[in-house]
Image: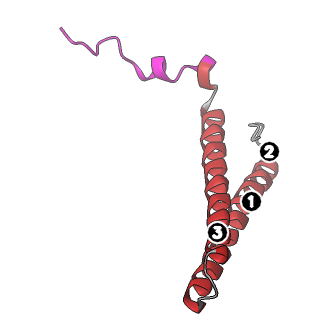
Amino acid sequence: MNVYADFEIETVFTPAKWGDFGQLASAIVTILISFAGAISIIFIVLAGIKFVTSSGDEKKLASASSSLTYAIIGLAVTILAFVILQIVQHFIGSKVPIT
């Protein structure tokens, strides 16, 4: 007796639950962009803590400065990813909402 006989991929990804592939992909992209933005903000806060606790040490200040720079670049890339995704969807005429 096969335990997986009734298992089909359609039972996991039903259209009523996820919609079509575009809606599933947009949900995944939205989650990833949100996660990347949250991580960037956490790194900005950690860089600020490094600045405060550096006590004037040049190496610690340089480390905090580079951490802050990279965190801001990460946040900018995250925002640009969302904007580029919106622009591409507009040009190809996609009706899948990304919010």
Question: Is 4 part of what is drawn in magenta?
Answer: yes
Marks 1/3: CA distance?
24 Å
Percent across and percent down for residue 9 are 43, 23
Quickly name the residue at label 1: 79
Against 41, is 90 above or below?
above
Give above or below for 64 relative to 45.
Answer: below
Residue at left offset 62%, top offset 43%: 31
Asked which quadrant contains residue 56, the reply is: bottom right
Disc 2 target residue: 93
Spatial separation of the CA atoms under disc 3 and disc 2: 45 Å
Residue type at numbered disc 3: Ile
Closer to the observer: label 1 or label 2?
1
Mark 1–mark 2 distance (CA, rounded to whole Å): 21 Å
Residue at 61 percent of width and 73 percent of height: 50
Q: Residue furthest bottom?
A: 58
Mark 3 or 2, nearer chain start? 3
- Of the numbered discs 1 and 2, the one sitting upstream in the chain is 1
Kind of element beneath mark 2? loop
Whether the magenta-drawn stretch holds residue 7 is answered as: yes
Residue identified by numbered label 3 = 49
Q: Earlier in the sequence, mark 1 or mark 3?
A: 3
Q: Position of residue 96 (x, y in %)?
A: 74, 37
Above or below: residue 10 compared with residue 73: above
Q: Which residues are magenta?
A: 1-16
Q: Cβ–Cβ below 8 Å for labels 3 and 2?
A: no
Q: Secondary structure at mark 1?
A: helix
In the rendering, at what x and y percent does residue 86 appear? 78, 51
Q: Quadrant of residue 19?
A: top right
